[in-house]
Amino acid sequence: QVQLVESGGGLVQAGGSLRLSCAASGSFISINTMRWYRQPPGKQREWVAGIGSYGITSYADSVKGRFTISRDNAKNTVYLQMNTLKPEDTAVYYCNADLNVSGSNKGQYWGQGTQVTVSS
């Protein structure tokens, strides 16, 4: 059973910072791409950032220059450092990862989400 567990969400004032973490646990061989998505209230889920197994990163235009994605492969963990937060960053943030579960068996997994609220 594979699990992705996020942590680090909370309430912060505009201009502040938060750091999200997402740890993968359970039975798997390796982790490929890891991503962060978010779902603002009343809107669809949107991709925020991604990082490949060798550390290549990509970002949505809306967060470029403010958010930084990183990973610690030894801890099976991905991070999202969020700086200069804006009220429009308010959303439930979800971790997503592509895992090699066994042999040729691969799967994509989601965390349960963590709430980030930015007050103006």
Image (cartoon, helix red, strand yellow):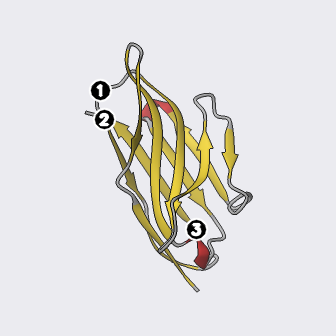
The picture places residue 99, in percent across and down from the top left corner, at: 43, 29
Q: Name the element at disc 3.
A: loop
**Is 61 on the left or on the right of 32, as rendered?**
right
Q: Look at the numbered disc 1 and give the secondary structure of its residue.
A: loop
Q: Residue at x 64, y 52 (%)?
A: 68
**How far across and how far down the image is residue 5, in percent?**
35, 48
* N-term mark: 1 or 2: 2
Q: Residues within 10 Å of mark 1 (few under 14, many from 20)?
A: few
Q: Earlier in the sequence, mark 1 or mark 3?
A: 3
- Is 9 situated above or below 29? below
Mark 3 or mark 2, earlier in chain: 2
Q: Residues within 10 Å of mark 3 (few under 14, many from 20)?
A: some
Labelled pair 1, 2 in contact (Cβ < 8 Å) = yes
Few, some or many C-alpha atoms within 10 Å of disc 2 (few <14, some 14-19, many ≥20)? some
Q: Residue furthest top?
A: 103
Q: Is residue 72 left or right of residue 16?
A: left
- Image quadrant in which the N terminus is located: top left
Amino acid beneath label 3: Ser
* Residue that mark 1 sits on: 27
Which label is found at residue 72? none
Question: Between residues 34 and 7, which one lies in front from this camera angle?
Answer: 34
Marks 1, 3: nearer the viewer: 1
Q: How many marks?
A: 3
Give, as a three-letter code, the residue at label 1. Answer: Ser
Q: Nearer the viewer, residue 109 or 72?
A: 109
Q: Please name the residue shown 53% across and 51% down the image.
A: 36
Residue occupied by mark 2: 2
Residue type, mark 2 in image: Val
Q: Is residue 44 above or below residue 24?
A: below
Left or right for 32, reference 27:
right
The residue singled out by tag 3 in the image is 17
User: What SS does tag 2 mark?
Assistant: loop
